Amino acid sequence: MSMRFRLIGLVAVVLLFSLAVGGLIACVNASRSVRTEMGSALQVARQTVDNAVRGLQSSADPRRDLDGLVASFAANRHLRVAVTGGAEAAALPVSDRAPFGEVPGWFVWLVGVAPLTDRLPVTIGGRPYGTFVIKTDPRNEILEVWNEVSESVAVLTLFCGLTIGLIYLSIGRALRPLDRLAAAFDAIARGDYQTRIDDRLTPELWRLRDNFNRMAARLAESASENRRLTEQLLTLQEAERSDIARDLHDEVSPFLFAINIDLATISRLVKERRTAELSDHVHSVADAVHHMQREVRSLLGRLRPIGLAEFGLADSIGSMVEFWRRRHPEIEYRVSVSPDCQRLGELADTTIYRVVQEALSNAVRHGRPTRIAVSIDRGLDPDTGRDATTVQIADDGEGMRESSSVGYGLLGMSERVRALGGRLTFGNRSADGFGVTAIVPCASTPAALATVAS
């Protein structure tokens, strides 16, 4: 059932309940009023008969005068008057017209006023002339009450009908913005994030409209950001593939060509039985294979950090720093990895490793530092209050020139961290040198993991 009909049903129930309570109160008041009216009519009739009988004590024709007294009650609406004994006379009440029909029996039962009877013996000049019987007849009074109640019910019914009709129209008008809001949500579900609601609404719906518009704006920004990230990721993938292809072409292909030549020479020398000359060519093939193994191992290390899953983040970072220490012993390396940062998850460990790898490579190759500090610690993110790992790489080198553009390495680090719901900042330090800070959440949602994995 719709909200409109629920509200109308609730109002209808309240109105019907109010009508029932009002009808019950009207019946109680009607019963009291009819009972009071009947009692008053009976008392007035008794007093009238007493006064008339005292006035007939000197009457020349008491019977005629008694008949006239009875006839005087013929216009009374509430009494049945009769004289019993001797020549009887009776006066019946005048019946009122009923514009709303006869009074139903259930209403008479609800009013519950029984007729009252009073008997007054008549004695004139010491001679009995019968008995005056006065009996109340509440039919006309009940009919009058019934007519009043019927009119009130008719008015209230009309009022209830108009009220329900106005409520129906008012609620329909009030709920019309919700229909537009539902259509706007359908548009958002179809991917139309430019949908906005600019209608004038009631104060109760202002916040809903403003929140919807803010949500749509943020979804539009997120969709634009996702498209931008996808383009950057594709660009980075193509760049990495180009680097790998170049390395394979420059480092592996020449040695494969050399091996092919050496093997052809070995085959020719074997056919010519010149075995004494085979040793040099075999050594040449072995050297080429050894060189290609080193290059392939290096490429695999770029694709996936070797030893990270087996030995953990701290040992892998230590091995990486040792690699650069052997090649640049003049640089002082300081490494601090908190014990809480072990086994953060494959994606988090790989991301942190790549950030440190790229930052170290940039510092050594471009910064000419004398000291590089690497710090990996775990705690609460000051912005979100959630558990996160903070990675900091700082050097005292030359820093980044203002005219320098951000390379693929820094972009790749930033996208990796943001894909996990973190953030990365970098720039020249207030003192000499360059700094990179990454905050990586310790728990990633399955959706985020699936996005990164794909």
Image (cartoon, rainbow, N blue to C red):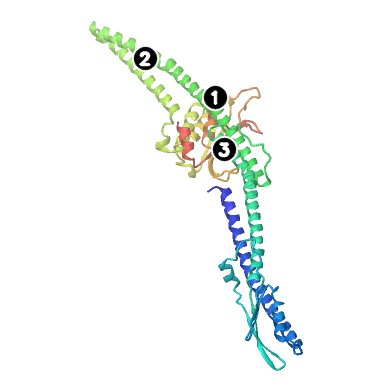
Q: Which residue is mark 1?
A: 408
**Upstream in sequence: badge 3 or badge 2:** 3
Residue located at (41% from left, 31% from top): 306
**Upstream in sequence: badge 2 or badge 1:** 2
**Upstream in sequence: badge 3 or badge 1:** 3
Q: Nearer the viewer, residue 406 or 430?
A: 406
Q: Amino acid at mark 3?
A: Phe
Residue 438 seen in the current view: no
Q: Nearer the viewer, mark 3 or mark 2?
A: 3
Residue 414 is left or right of residue 122, and the answer is left
Q: CA distance from mark 3 to mark 2?
A: 61 Å
Q: Which residue is mark 2?
A: 256
Residue 435 x %, y %? 60, 33
Residue with the most extreme front position? 60
For label 1, the crowd category at 10 Å Cα-Cα, with few meaning under 14, some 14 to 19 and many 20 or more, is some
- State the quadrant of the C terminus: top left
Q: CA distance from mark 2 to mark 1?
A: 30 Å
In this view, 106 is above or below 264: below
